[in-house]
Image (spheres, grey):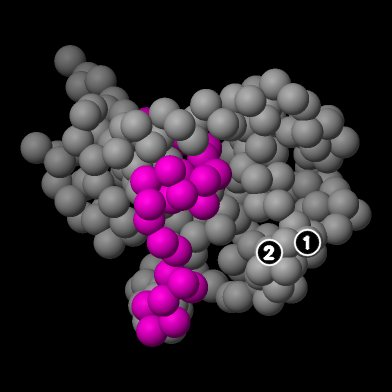
Amino acid sequence: MTKPAQTVEFYFDYVSPYTYLADTQLGALDAEIIYRPVAIMDVMKLVNNQPSPMCPPKGRYAGLDAARWAKRYGVKLTSNSALWAALMAGKFDPRTLIRGAMAAQSLGVFPRYNSAIFNAVWRDEADLVSQAGRDAVLTAAGLDAAAIWRKADAEATKVALEANVKAAAERGVFGTPTFFIGGEPFFGNDRLDFIRAHLAA
């Protein structure tokens, strides 16, 4: 008799290098992955957590550490300087990308969207700040950019994201990547070994 697949819930956003790194490894897990999109900066505010850039030594270390993990996984990891400059200057709302993920889920095209956006941010240094750039990224992935962004900008999607953020904070999420197997949480790309052991037990 075939053992039913276990499920791993994956709380994610596109602004974390560790979340990108973890995402590159999820296909090797013997489990069904349920993607839970959140605006992680909003979650962190709710639970009084501080992002790494607020502590310069921690931010510098995180950059070195993420590069080590990328080398171990054999994946490219770059810094999308134009995107981060726009974020820091308040000229781009990172919620745009995660609302796009929610739109792609509802439209049944999430895997292609997820791969395209993670790669655009962390591998290809693509333009995601301008509308034309975002459209080009999705079009290159064979997606209907206009349909996705239209749904992403809908008020219902914005309200749903706020609900996701609140539910994540109430569940104990304080950063990404966060995983749940049943009621047990695992935080961080460096906890994938624990997740594999839990699934195998």
Between 153 and 119, the residue placed more toward the observer is 153
**Does residue 158 sit above or below 94 in this rendering?**
above
Q: How far apart are marks 2 and 1 (CA)?
A: 6 Å
Badge 1 amino acid: Lys
Tell me which segment is drawn in magenta: 30-58
Q: Are circles 2 and 1 on residues that touch, CB within 8 Å?
A: yes
Residue occupying the point 49% across, 35% down? 165
Q: Where is residue 163 in the image (x, y as percent from the top left)?
A: 52, 26
The image position of residue 162, as x and y in percent, is 56, 31
Q: Which mark is residue 91?
A: 1
Q: Which mark is residue 87?
A: 2
At 66% from the left edge and 52% from the top edge, which residue is drawn?
Answer: 94
| Amino acid type at image mark 2 | Leu
Q: Residue at left 57%, top 53%? A: 14
Residue 176 in the image: above or below residue 78: above
Crowding at mark 2 (Cα within 10 Å: few <14, some 14-19, many 20+): some
Name the residue: 56% across, 58% down. 15
Visible in this render: residue 10?
Answer: no
